[in-house]
Amino acid sequence: MSSSFISKETLNKILKRLAAAEDVLLLAPVWNGKVLDFVTVTDAEKIVISDDIPYKSPKEAFMPQTENLMTFLEGDVLESEYDKKTVVFGAKPCDAEALRVLHAVLTDGKFQDPFFMRRFESSVLIAVGCANEKPGCFCAERGFDRTFSDFSDIMLHEDEGGSGYTVTCLSDKGRGLLSGFDETKGIEAAERTAETPAAGIKKLELDKNIEDRELFDIIDWEKATEICQGCGMCTFICPSCHCFDFKDVSGFNETKRYRCWDSCMYPQFTLHASGHNPRASVKERFRQRVLHKYLYINKIFGYTACTGCGRCIRSCPAGMNIKKVVESIMEVLP
Amino acid sequence: MSFDAQRGKIKEICKDLLEKGTVDTVIGYAEGGIDGARIPCMCGKPEEADALCWDQRCVANLCTYAYDKRDKKTGVVAKPCDVRGIVNYIAENQLNRENVYIIGVDCEGMAGSDGEKLPWCAECSVKTPPVYDVRVENPDLPDKSSTKIEEPGGMTGDFGKFQKEIGKCILCYSCRQACCGCYCPVCFMDRGVPNWQPAEPGQSAKMMYHLGRAAHLAGRCVECGACERVCASGVDVRYLIREATGFVEDMYGFRAGFDTEADPVMASYDANDREIGFLGGDDHE
């Protein structure tokens, strides 16, 4: 037994402590009715550790669906306060890779998003490597290792005997959390790096030097999107989608400003005050979603905002498949 | 067995429709989903009809696609619930009867990836299409039994459970998009003026949405289960609407999607109506 080993028993003890801690929000996969969901856990017994992928990503730990940013009160602007620590347990390596994209978009460059940063800096992401792919998964095609991501703070991966996990710490936040428990004092985290996917798998990506106009008619987008219902669920459950909108809500003497998730799949997303909508139909909206993920973010930040978690494919009511669409673009590209 | 026999006939009919030019497009089911689910498929050429599927995994309701293509002549491979959706569109003047060719298919109910019958299919009593241009029969099916809706069960009056159910909702509106009764060009939830979304966009917004949608679907729901099928969050979306549907049937003896000529019950006025739905009262028993 190596010193980087943590038994299932010890892990459960730690999770129980985290769930009970008042200043820590523990977010983990739990069965919520019929679906596996990421929820705030108070009963650690309910946490599910498996290859099943929660239908929704853990991005809400860093960017909640609705977040009060500030309050305008009698001429003053009061910034909202945040003093919680969050531990996200049971994320997948693809979720950690998606967080890398969120981090780049919201903090690289000229402006830093302070509301994202304060959550990011006070949170620890504990990812568990997958043993097997699920239907719809395509992380290998996206060039990721399904057992490892170095953007997580702590990486667990199941020991061959099945009695516990090998621990790898990848950040000071992770080391700090692990050293805070008596049970884990002796554990020396293993050194690991991501493995490149097996040869023979063609990487799913678009060359960032392509002009987007070249892709506007390269495939029949109308045919590709004819069954899409335009609901936008794919964007809400996606770990790397991050578009948002502001909403000011006026009360009697105060106004609160909220940030809410928005979705490029909604008609209102690009609706102008004049009534003109540059993305008038599902065809333009879905094309934007694909090109934003695979081309625009790649041009600006050097990442593709799709980590192959397959959530949008598994949950799509109509059977849309982003992988097939990108493949069809790659096929016709010179 | 019966699925196989029906499949051949569906392909034959669709091919013929496209060859003769009776319709521009046929909407049916094809392979391509995850876990063996069939996905909607639109065929414009006769040879494309070879790809059509028909088995117990044809879960989607196709009538919303017929509505999207309402300006053209469209054939639809329609289960009884899909037919009822189309009938509802026609009754509400949203679709011309001449523009839709209904290939009505007898349906014993669809199943999930685990082979279990879907809950709304298990409850369904309408196994044969009420309206059709051509019918693909399944002689093994029992005769159409009572059209009376099953007693709505479960959550009547339980506010805590209602809160818990909608607490799972992420307001992605996929139930609205999949619903054949939700065809408003701009949904009340998307309107800025007046703003129907309550102050804080959280649980109260979810209540507004689910209650608002249920009220709008009273007497219009065709019980296809699409709203619950598409819900990634696993919300029991149907129960509120099932209750409204049962109420309308008790009050007015009306169930949507059987008669293209019937006046939509909530859109017709009768001076003698006691309007219990609005005014309350317990004398409607």
Image (tube, coloured by chain):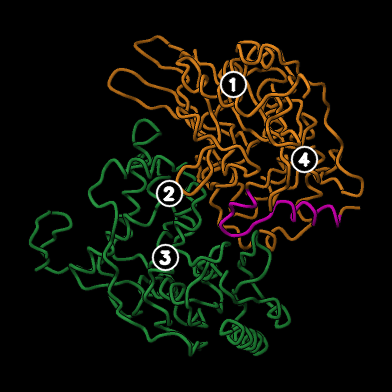
Task: Based on the picture, tell me whether residue A313 belongs to the magenta stretch.
Answer: yes
Give the secondary structure at mark 4. Answer: helix
Residue marked by disc 2: B235
User: Which residue does the image show at 75% across and 22% down from the upper left?
Assistant: A168
> Which of the two discs, 2 and 4, sits closer to the camera?
2
Among the two numbered marks 1 and 4 on one chain, the one whose residue lies closer to the N terminus: 1
Name the residue tied to disc 4: A295
Shade of chain B as shown in the rendered figure:
green
Q: Where's residue A302, x and y in %?
A: 80, 31
Kindly report the distance in space between the C-alpha atoms of the residues bearing marks 1 and 4: 24 Å
* Prevailing secondary structure of the magenta residues: helix
The label on residue A116 is: 1
First to last magenta residue range: A312-332
Q: Residue at x 76, y 19 (%)?
A: A3
Q: Is residue B277 within the magenta segment?
A: no
Chain that is coloured orange in the picture: A
User: Is disc 2 in the same subunit as disc 1?
Assistant: no
* Amino acid type, mark 4: Leu
